[in-house]
Amino acid sequence: MISAQHYKDAVERASALLEKAGIVITPEEHARFEVADFGLGELENTGLEIITYVNTQRSCAKEIVMFAGQTCPEHWHPTINGVPGKEETFRCRWGTVYLYVPGERTPHPACKPPKGSEAHYEVGQQITLKAGDQYTLMPDTPHWFQAGDEGAVVSEFSTRSTDDQDVFRDPRIARAPKVGNAG
Amino acid sequence: MISAQHYKDAVERASALLEKAGIVITPEEHARFEVADFGLGELENTGLEIITYVNTQRSCAKEIVMFAGQTCPEHWHPTINGVPGKEETFRCRWGTVYLYVPGERTPHPACKPPKGSEAHYEVGQQITLKAGDQYTLMPDTPHWFQAGDEGAVVSEFSTRSTDDQDVFRDPRIARAPKVGNAG
C-alpha cells in the first residue's frame, strides 16, 4: 500500500507531466488518479499513474503517466474460455516509452528490467515510441514497457479493461488489489 | 468531391488546430488526413477532419478536428442482425463542442443546424464539452455535434468503426464514398 503522502506526491508529479503534454483532465478525474505500484513497494522503479477515461463492456480509454525510468512489468491479457483477452493500442503523446514484445531480442536495448526483478522479464524486442508513435498489442501477447529520461504520457485505447485478469510474469505481483486513492 | 486545393487547405487548417491542442501526429498520418464533407459540398458548415489512429475488429480511436461552427450531421450507429452498433466516447481535448442527443430539448441551445438542413436534425438535448469533458454514446443513439467559435479537437474512443453502416437523418448524405485524400 502506498502512503497517503506518497500517493499525493505521485499525483502531483503525474499531473505536471500531463500538463507538459497539454492534456486536460477534470477535477473529478484528478481526484481519482490511480497510482499503481503493483504491490512491489518501489513505485519509482515499478509503477504507473493512470486516469481511466471510460471502461464499458466493449471499450476502454486511459491516459498513462510514467515517471522517468518507471516500468510497467511484463504481463499479458489472456483469452479465457474462448473470450478474447484485452486488445490495446499504446499511443505516445509526450516523452519516450520503450515497449518490449515477443520477437528477436533487440541488441543493446535502451532499458533494463528493474534491479532484482530480471528473472521476471522475458520478451526483448524493443519498440521505441515517441510523441505520435503507437503500437497495437493483440490479446495473449506478453509485454512490458519503461519510460525514457523525461518520463512519458501514453494514451491507451482498448477493449474492456479487466485488470484482475491480467497475468504477470512476476508471481509477487498482485494487480487486482488496486493501490489506493488516498483521497 | 472536394478539390485538391480545398483538401490541402482543410488539412493545413486542421493541422494548425491539432498543434494548438498539443497533439502530435506522424507524417504518415498527416498524409492520410481524412476530410469529409458528407457529400453536401459545404465543408465549412457540414464536415469533419479526421485522423484514424487505429481501427481493428474490436477497437477504434480517432482524432476529430472541427473548424469553428462546423457540424457533424445527425446520425446513429445501428445494431444490425443482433450485432450491436458502434459505441463511442467523445472527449474534448481543445476548444468547445456542443453535442446533441435524445432527451428534453435544451432551451436556447448554443447551435443551430446548418441553414437549409434543419429538417434533418431532430434531437436537441445539448451536452457542452470543453477540454477534459467527455460523453459516451451507446449504439442506435441519434446524435449530431457542432464546434464552438474557436473550433474543437475531439478524441473519439470506440468499438470498431464501420462508417458505411452509419445511418444519417439527411437522405442526401452518403458517408461511404469517402471524400478523397488528394495526396
Image: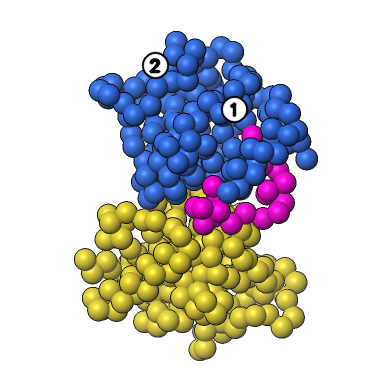
Chain colours: A blue, B yellow
Q: Secondary structure at mark 2?
A: loop
Q: Position of residue A156 (x, y in %)?
A: 50, 42
Q: Position of residue B177 (x, y in %)?
A: 32, 67
Tell me the quarter of the picture where residue A1 sits.
Answer: top right
Q: Residue at x 34, y 29 (%)?
A: A110
Rendered view: B133 above or below B159: below
- The residue beneath circle 1 is A43
Tell me the quarter of the picture where residue A56 sits.
Answer: top right
Q: Residues within 10 Å of mark 2 (few under 14, many from 20)?
A: some
Rendered view: B124 above or below B34: below
Q: Residue at x 52, y 14 (%)?
A: A170
Rendered view: A178 above or below B182: above
Q: Position of residue A91 (x, y in %)?
A: 43, 45
- Between residues B2 and A154, which one lies in front from this camera angle? A154
Name the amino acid type tagged 2. Glu
- The residue beneath circle 2 is A122
Q: CA distance from mark 2 to mark 1?
A: 21 Å
Question: Do the residues at pointers 2 and 1 share their chain?
Answer: yes
Residue found farthest to the right: A183
- Between residues A129 and A43, which one lies in front from this camera angle? A43
Position of B78 compared to B179: left or right? right
Magenta span covers which residues?
A: A17-35
